Amino acid sequence: MRGIDPFYKPTWRIVILSGVVVLLWGLTAWLRMLAGNIPPLELTGIALAGAAASSRLLPGTYGAFRTAVRDHRWYAWVVVVAGLIGGAAFYFAALAYAPAAQVVVITYSWPLLFAMASDVYSGRRPAPTTFVSLLLGLAGVFVMHGSMQAPSPGAWLGYVGGLASGLCWVAYSLFLQVYSRPVGSAYPAFFTAAAVTALALQAAIGGLVWPATVGAWVASAMLGIGPYGLGFVAWGHVVRHGHPRIVPVLPYAVPAVAAITLVMAGRAQPTLFLFAGCVLVTIACVVSTRVRTL
């Protein structure tokens, strides 16, 4: 089994990559809004096509398509491609039904589930504190809702989509952590396969609806170059080589970055409920990881 060396000492490269990942993921909700009413699967395909093109410029990716087919078994293709598509498409769909701030918090509380999955995979019983933290995180989402009324059915669809996106991230990250082969040089091939699959699915289900403006095209391309291109590549490196006490904590900063970005862009109001919800979810996640690693 391929795991993370518990005695690994973080380097400045890991720290910088971690910061880049958090920043890129924090911009995702805003870029998705700028992309307009493109169907989630199609936007995923366009973004991943951009990711395939941009990742081809990275060092060590020469001959990526040939070597990827030769070096990686079928199950690696299934898990990585499904993780790429699911993590993006469910997230994009969720943003169409529920407020972006809540969706971001739900999606990026997936480290709680990642901690539980890692424990189960390693044969350990999840700590009771993990379940308490999960309940705290859900309470934070209700606080962010800003009302004593239950969320609307449409909002619940968005919350479920955010959770589904988070589960895809859990499966994808856990697989990268234990997979015996490095996937860095094969990302252009994985991105291409995922882009073709997503666009083919959208064409079969509801037809393709291309971006209507130059701004929408630019936002779609930036999603691929940034959060779902360099962000995925950098995260894959951090997961495999970062310190196990640091890696699970990284996504916790994403909701804060996303909230600041949305407020600055005029897409969300800086309410007390938003702040309190972010604080609750952050406390829940940090406590869970802290107890798990002691």
Image (cartoon, grey):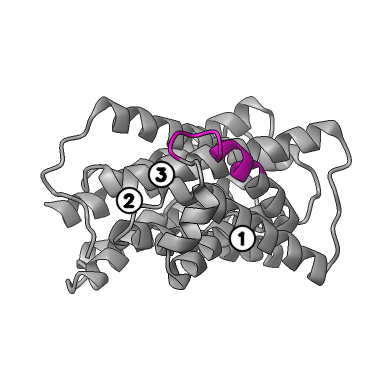
The mark lying in front, picked from 3 and 1, is 3
Which numbered disc covers residue 90? Answer: 1
Q: Is residue 114 left or right of residue 163?
A: left
Residues under labels 3 and 2: Cα distance? 19 Å
Q: As drawn, which residue projects farthest toward the right? A: 212
Q: Earlier in the sequence, mark 2 or mark 1?
A: 1
Q: Secondary structure at mark 1?
A: helix
Crowding near the residue tagged with mark 2, few <14, some 14–19, many ≥20 C-alpha atoms within 10 Å:
many
Q: Which residues are magenta?
A: 50-60
Q: Secondary structure at mark 3?
A: helix
| The N terminus: image quadrant | bottom left
Which numbered disc covers residue 235? Answer: 3
Residue 291 falls in image quadrant: bottom left
Residue matched to label 2: 285
**Whole-percent x and y of residue 2?**
24, 60
Residue type (three-letter) at the residue carrying disc 2: Cys
Residue type (three-letter) at the residue carrying disc 3: Trp
Residues under labels 3 and 1: Cα distance? 19 Å
Residue 70 falls in image quadrant: bottom left
Residue at 66% over, 42% down:
50
Residue at 61% over, 58% down:
194
Residue type (three-letter) at the residue carrying disc 1: Phe
**Whole-percent x and y of residue 34?**
74, 37
Residues under labels 2 and 1: Cα distance? 22 Å
Residue at 43% over, 57% down:
139
